[in-house]
Image (cartoon, grey):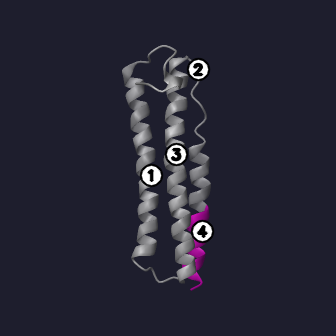
Amino acid sequence: MRPEVLRDGTEPDPRFTLANERTFLAWIRTGLALVAGAVAVEGFGIDLDEGVRTILAIGLTTLGVAVAVGAGVRWLRVEAAMRHGRPLPFPTLIPFLVVATVVAAATLLVLVTTR
């Protein structure tokens, strides 16, 4: 059974649908890696202040969840665009992930070097 958004339009070439699914799975892997990073930060007791570790773990988990949700939304938007012959939507996940990763990495770098 297909979601309502995918019931109308023309069935796209299966290769494009499968490529869209592979891209979705790549985004899901990215989200899982962020959550795994959160588990590593919190679970392995990295030598940081407990509050900082907790904030970093929560931030990585939140980012991982946001990427996973964004992946699902993106998959549906791309599938609908292909079915209706519209241009593909702008990948808003990419700039979001870039900014969030830079902020998280810079924060961790400052914390580690000033310790």
- Where does the magenta region start and end? 103-115
Rate crowding at label 1 as few (under 14), some (14 to 19) or many (20 or more) other CA atoms within 10 Å: some
- Identify the residue shown where x is 58% and y is 53%: 98
Gap between marks 2 and 4 measured at Cα: 38 Å
Name the chief secondary structure element in magenta.
Answer: helix
Precedes in sequence: disc 2 or disc 1: 1
Disc with the residue nearer the chain's start (4 vs 1): 1
Q: How many marks?
A: 4
x and y, in percent, of residue 16 in the image? 42, 25
As shown in the figure, which amino acid type bears the numbered disc 2?
A: Arg
Give the Cα distance between marks 3 and 2: 23 Å
Disc on res. 30: 1
Identify the residue shown where x is 44% and y is 39%.
Answer: 24
Helix, strand or loop status at disc 3: helix
* Label 2 secondary element: loop
The answer to whether residue 115 is above or below residue 30 is below
At label 3, counting other C-alpha atoms closer than 10 Å, the crowd grade (few under 14, some 14-19, many 20 or more) is: some
Instruction: Say which of marks 3 and 1 sits in front.
Output: 3
Judge the density around disc 2: few (<14), some (14-19), many (≥20) Cα neighbours within 10 Å.
Answer: few
Report the mark closest to the observer, 2 or 4. Answer: 2
Image position, residue 102 (x, y; %): 59, 61
Disc 4 crowd rating (10 Å Cα; few below 14, some 14-19, many 20+) is few
Which disc number belongs to residue 69?
A: 3
Image quadrant holding the N terminus, namely top left
* Residue on which the image places disc 2: 86
**Marks 2 & 4, CB-CB < 8 Å contact:** no
Which residue is tagged 4? 106
Give the structural element (helix, strand or loop) at label 4: helix
Q: Is residue 23 above or below residue 12?
A: below
